[in-house]
Every structure is written in C-alpha cells, then in structure tokens.
Image (cartoon, rainbow, N blue to C red):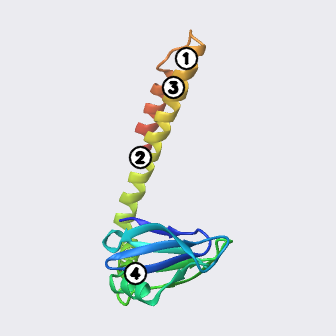
Amino acid sequence: MPTACLLQPRLHCSLQGERLIIRAAKEENEEETVFIHAIPLHDLERVIASDTTHFTTPALAALLSRGIPIQLFSWAGTFLGSFLPAHNHHGHARLAQYQLTLDPARCLALAQKILHAKLYNQRRVLQRLHHSRMRHHSGHSPHLVSQKCAIFCSESRR
C-alpha cells in the first residue's frame, strides 16, 4: 500500500466521503486553496506530512480509525512526532523479528544466506566488469575472473 507524502508548503487536508482531499494554499491569498489530489482512504498505509500541513479533525479521525499512522516532519527533516492508531500492528511485527534473533541456528542460517547472496552478486559484478574490459583488451582468457570467483564462492561455502 502506498504512503502519502504531503511535503509541499501550506497544504490543507480534509475528508470528503472516503477520500482525503489535498488542497494547496494560493501564494497571493492564504485563505484560498487549489485542488491538488483526492486519495482514497482504502489505498493508504501511512501519511507523512510537513509541519505546515493543516488537517481537519474529521480527516485525522478517519485516518486513525482506519489504522493509518501520521508522521510529522520539520522542513529540515527532523521527526517531530506522530499520530498512531489505537492498535498498531507495526510494533508486534518488530517484536516478532527481534524474537527470531534469539535463536542462534536461525541467525547463522540467515547470515549464510546473506553472505552467499553477497558473494554471488559480487561475482556477477566482476564478470560484467571483466567482460566489458575484454572487449577493449583482447588476448586475455575471458573466463579467468569467472573461474577465480567460482573457486572463491565454493571455498566460502565450507
């Protein structure tokens, strides 16, 4: 699900039916607004807003009642705070992830998978680099780097 990033200066967010209506203040008159976008609430996962964004109370209530958190940031990018729904599933997911780190066998298996993927990707990068260099400098064995990488990867699995 998408995140709505409301970072333009002086935005106004209100509720119209099941949609979050985004409007921007006109430069010459702060009281007048121009329609920017309508976002269906069922499409949102979270809202990130700047400190100059104005929310109506019904819009805040609708977002929170649907479990959509709202984070506020300053123009410098400093996290100011958030509005969280009464029941937030993000904390439970994070706790479950932390509990998995307590199992040494699972940690070792995960570390091995990460290392294997890293070595495989590095091998592919070196193969591509070697192939592009071989086009410019013919006369070297085109499989030399590939063979050395394969030996290194097979030794790392032990």
Q: Residues within 10 Å of mark 4 (few under 14, many from 20)?
A: many
The answer to whether mark 3 and mark 4 are in CB contact below 8 A is no
In 3D space, how far apart are the residues under numbered discs 1 and 2 (Cα atoms)?
A: 27 Å
In 3D space, how far apart are the residues under numbered discs 4 and 2 (Cα atoms)?
A: 49 Å
Q: Earlier in the sequence, mark 1 or mark 2?
A: 2
Q: Which residue is mark 4?
A: 15
- Name the front one of labels 3 and 4: 4
In 3D space, how far apart are the residues under numbered discs 3 and 4 (Cα atoms)?
A: 60 Å
Q: Amino acid at mark 2?
A: His
Task: Give above or below for 10 relative to 113.
Answer: below
Q: Which residue is mark 2?
A: 116
- The quadrant of the image that shows the N terminus is bottom left
In 3D space, how far apart are the residues under numbered discs 4 and 1 (Cα atoms)?
A: 61 Å
Q: Earlier in the sequence, mark 3 or mark 1?
A: 1
Task: Give above or below for 84 relative to 20.
Answer: below
What label sits on residue 134 in the rendered view?
A: 1
Q: Amino acid at mark 4?
A: Leu
In 3D space, how far apart are the residues under numbered discs 3 and 2 (Cα atoms)?
A: 18 Å
Q: Quadrant of residue 51?
A: bottom right
Q: Earlier in the sequence, mark 3 or mark 2?
A: 2
The answer to whether mark 3 and mark 2 are in CB contact below 8 A is no
Q: Earlier in the sequence, mark 4 or mark 2?
A: 4
Q: Amino acid at mark 3?
A: Val
The residue drawn where x is 51% and y is 34% is 125
* Residue 147, percent from left and from top: 45, 26
